[in-house]
Amino acid sequence: MSRLIKKPIEIPKGVEIKITEDTVTVKGPKGELQESFLPYVKFELREDGLWVLPNTDIVRRKSDYRKIAMFCGTYWSLVRNMVVGVTKGYQKELEIIGVGYRAQLQGKKLVMNLGFAHPVEVDPPEGITFEVPAPNAIVVKGISKYLVGQVAANIRRWREPIVYSGKGIRYKGEYVRTKVGKKV
């Protein structure tokens, strides 16, 4: 079994958790998240927090115990990320490196000049906001850890860092190892 399920998920003040047969809904000050789960685990609300327990009622053969053990830790992490998201939120910071590369906001839309013949426009999905504190910095904010990471990865994919010059979009603090170019 996962070591994570040996302790409960702490529920801060102002957070409500609603559990149905296959979904968990977490509502907090920043918003509401809902996730549906497979029947391998049971959720139990107690006074010290939310417990994720293995559902041994569905075991038909011995190998099912291993599958249940895998899902317990995964679902514990997913629910904990939902609780953190509705209380604190998540953010990813990106840096743009290169001459003439820059970003700006037009309303809610992110517009980037990345050396293409046209500017790249990115519309934020529901629940995501963009901030541009400097022309070479982008901040992606939201309450869903998965969605924030996916949107940041999609923005980075427009111009991944080049290993010879280091130009491109990278996460803040990411180290890009540059190679030596061709010698003449």
Image (cartoon, rainbow, N blue to C red):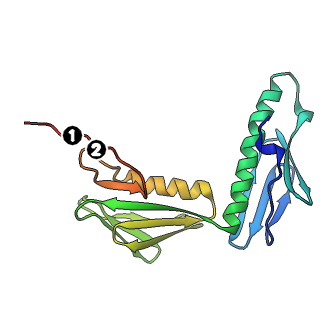
Residue at the farthest bottom position: 107
Residue 142's tag is: none
- Badge 2: few (under 14), some or many (20 or more) residues near its Cα, within 10 Å? few
Is any atom of residue 157 visible in this view?
yes
Residue at the farthest left position: 184
Q: Position of residue 170 (x, y in %)?
A: 39, 54
Give the quadrant of residue 91.
bottom right
Whole-angstrom CA distance, mark 1 to mark 2, is: 7 Å
- The residue depicted at 72 percent of the width and 73 percent of the height is 29
Three-letter code, disc 1? Val
Front-most of 47 and 62? 47
**Tag 1–tag 2 contact (CB < 8 Å):** yes
- Relative to 94, 15 lies left or right: right
Three-letter code, disc 2? Thr
Q: What SS does tag 2 mark? A: loop
- Relative to 163, 32 lies left or right: right
- The residue depicted at 29 percent of the width and 47 percent of the height is 162
Is any atom of residue 123 visible in this view?
no
Image quarter (top left, top right, bottom left or bottom right) of the C terminus: top left
Q: What SS does tag 1 mark? A: loop
Image quarter (top left, top right, bottom left or bottom right) of the N terminus: top right
Residue under numbered circle 1? 180
Front-most of 180 and 74? 180
Q: Position of residue 36 (x, y in %)?
A: 75, 50
Q: Position of residue 28 (x, y in %)?
A: 74, 69
Q: Position of residue 15 (x, y in %)?
A: 79, 68
Residue under numbered circle 2? 178
- The residue depicted at 80 percent of the width and 59 percent of the height is 10
- The residue depicted at 68 percent of the width and 72 percent of the height is 30
- Relative to 75, 167 lies left or right: left
Decide: is 113 above or below 133. Answer: above
